[in-house]
Image: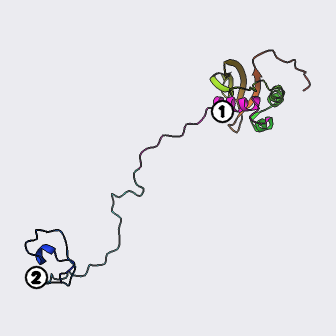
Amino acid sequence: MPNPATPVAATLPGSGATTAYAPGPAVRTGAAPAARPAAPVARPYTRPAAAPLVPVQTPRRPVPQLRPTDHFAELLLGVLSGRRPVHSMLRHTVGRAYDDLADLAERGPLRTRGAAPVVRDIGYFEPRPGALEVFARIGAGDRLRAMAFRLEQGRDLRWRCTAVELGGPRRPRADDD
């Protein structure tokens, strides 16, 4: 029987098959076995100098961060449309801004039955470093509203809202503080 490593063409003359193999015992062709190489010398492993420690990666674009104007416009819109509770703005407001925001949210000026309100446009003015006066156009369906707020940067470099207003007549303010 032929060896598994013996080609069928060598076992079956004239078959023309040269890539198929037939099972069977090993058959030696008379060639002398190759001499064994000398045992390898033990050497300590050294990393090739050109091999990088970390595989090369394609450069990634940095994740875009929202500007404070955009971030606060979205936060305020969430509160004034009823999607976020007013108290979620406690750590983002200073002074009368929280009271004004609570009064505005109580009236629900941006609550809609149809399309949810979205920020359509934002602009700002920087009266001094660390202070921004921001306006935003809020759209809900075919209605367009105006929102204005002031941001100030604290010593801890966090931005906080110090005033907020919506377009329309202002409510009279009692000077109780």
Residue position marked by numbered label 1 in the rendering: 71
Question: Of residues 158 and 142, which is closer to you in this image?
Answer: 142
The quadrant in which the N terminus is found is bottom left
**How far is mark 2 from mark 1, CA to CA?**
82 Å
Disc nearer the start of the sequence (2/1)? 2
In this view, 7 is above or below 30: above
| Disc 2 and disc 1 in contact, CB within 8 angstroms | no
User: Looking at the picture, how far across and down is residue 61, in whole percent?
Assistant: 48, 40
* Residue 23 as seen in the image, left or right of residue 88: left
Could you say which quadrant of the image residue 53 lies in?
Answer: bottom left
What is the secondary structure assignment of the residue under circle 2? loop
How busy is the neighbourhood of tag 2: few (under 14 within 10 Å), some, or many (20 plus)?
Answer: few
Q: Mark 1 belongs to which amino acid?
A: His
User: Is residue 35 inside the magenta stretch?
Assistant: no
Most foreground residue, 74 or 17 = 17
Q: Which of 61 and 160 lies nearest the eye of the viewer?
A: 61
Image quadrant where residue 16 sits: bottom left
Residue 27 point in image, percent of width and height: 15, 84
Residue 88 lies, in percent from the top left, at 77, 38
Residue type beneath disc 2: Thr
- Mark 2 lies on residue: 29
Residue located at (72% from left, 34% from top): 154
Residue at the left extreme? 14
SS category of the residue bearing label 1: helix
**Which residue occupies 41% across, 49% down?**
57
Q: Quadrant of the C terminus?
A: top right
Q: Residue at x 75, y 29 (%)?
A: 81
In this orientation, which residue lies closer to the viewer: 109 or 168? 109
- Say whether residue 83 is magenta: yes
Task: Point out the frontmost of discs 2 and 1.
Answer: 2
- Look at the image and give the residue range highlighted in magenta: 57-85
